Image (tube, rainbow, N blue to C red):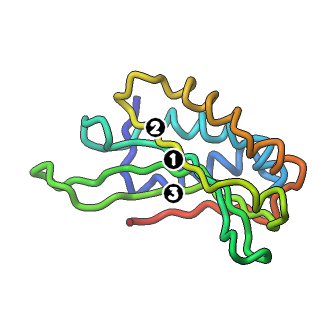
């Protein structure tokens, strides 16, 4: 399988989304698990260590400000190393949804869950677990106000 350069991770995420959910935030939310699974299958040129390539599922909002957006995202984190194998930076690609905050969403605790290649838990098992989170019925009922693909070094 082709190992893509890390700097192509953002454009490849856009290609996956435009192919699987071309019609906006509602379509992207409906297809997000398929998008993430498809994107996970792409291999990038990272070190062969367990935490060099991983995914984060996270959601939450600013509970002090009712008008603040509620966010839900999947983030892929790739570790960049130099020719000697020394850490350079992390590169992250996020599939990020924003929702209008309301009482139900405000009642949720902020949450996050990581998965890394090399773990004993297979990716599909982790994805199935986070797809059962209590947040999903709430966000599906509301629909996102915005969907962005964000990427860069952190």
Q: Which residue is mark 2?
A: 115
SS class, disc 1 = strand
* Marks 3 and 1, the one that precedes in the sequence: 3
At a point 25% along the width and 36% down the height, the residue shown is 49
Residue shown at the point (32%, 44%) measured from the top left:
52
Q: Secondary structure at mark 3?
A: helix
Q: CA distance from mark 3 to mark 1?
A: 16 Å
Quarter of the image for the C terminus: give it. Answer: bottom left
Choose mark 3 or mark 2, whichever is in front.
Answer: 2
Q: Residues within 10 Å of mark 3 (few under 14, many from 20)?
A: some
Which image quarter is the N terminus in? top left
- Percent across and percent down for residue 132 are 70, 32
Task: Say left or right for 128 vs 20.
Answer: left
In the image, residue 140 sits, relative to residue 132, either above or below, namely below
Which element carries disc 2, helix, strand or loop? strand
The image shows a total of numbered marks equal to 3
Q: Is residue 102 left or right of residue 92?
A: right
Mark 2 is surrounded, within 10 Å at the Cα level, by few (under 14), some (14 to 19) or many (20 or more) other residues, namely many
Question: Is label 2 in contact with label 1 (beta carbons under 8 Å)?
Answer: yes
Sooner in the amino-acid sequence: mark 2 or mark 1: 1
Could you tell me residue 22's position as x and y percent?
78, 51
Q: Return the residue at label 3.
A: 10
In this view, the residue in front, 41 or 32, is: 32
Q: Position of residue 21 (x, y in %)?
A: 76, 47
The residue to which callout 1 is attached is 56
Is 136 left or right of 154, judged from the image as shown? Answer: right
């Amino acid at each position: 399988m082709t190992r893509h350069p890390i700097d192509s991770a953002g454009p490849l995420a856009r290609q996956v989304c435009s192919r699987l959910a071309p019609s906006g935030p509602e379509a992207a939310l409906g297809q997000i698990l398929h998008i993430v699974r498809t994107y996970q299958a792409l291999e990038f040129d990272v070190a062969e260590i367990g935490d060099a390539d991983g995914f984060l599922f996270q959601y939450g909002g600013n509970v002090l400000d009712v008008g603040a957006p509620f966010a839900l995202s999947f983030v892929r984190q790739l570790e960049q190393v130099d020719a000697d194998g020394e850490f350079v930076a992390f590169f992250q690609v996020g599939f990020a949804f924003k929702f209008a905050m309301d009482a139900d969403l405000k009642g949720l605790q902020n949450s996050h869950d990581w998965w890394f290649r090399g773990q004993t838990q297979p990716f599909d098992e982790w994805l199935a677990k986070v797809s059962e989170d209590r947040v999903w019925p709430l966000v599906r009922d509301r629909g996102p106000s915005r969907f962005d693909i964000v990427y860069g070094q952190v």
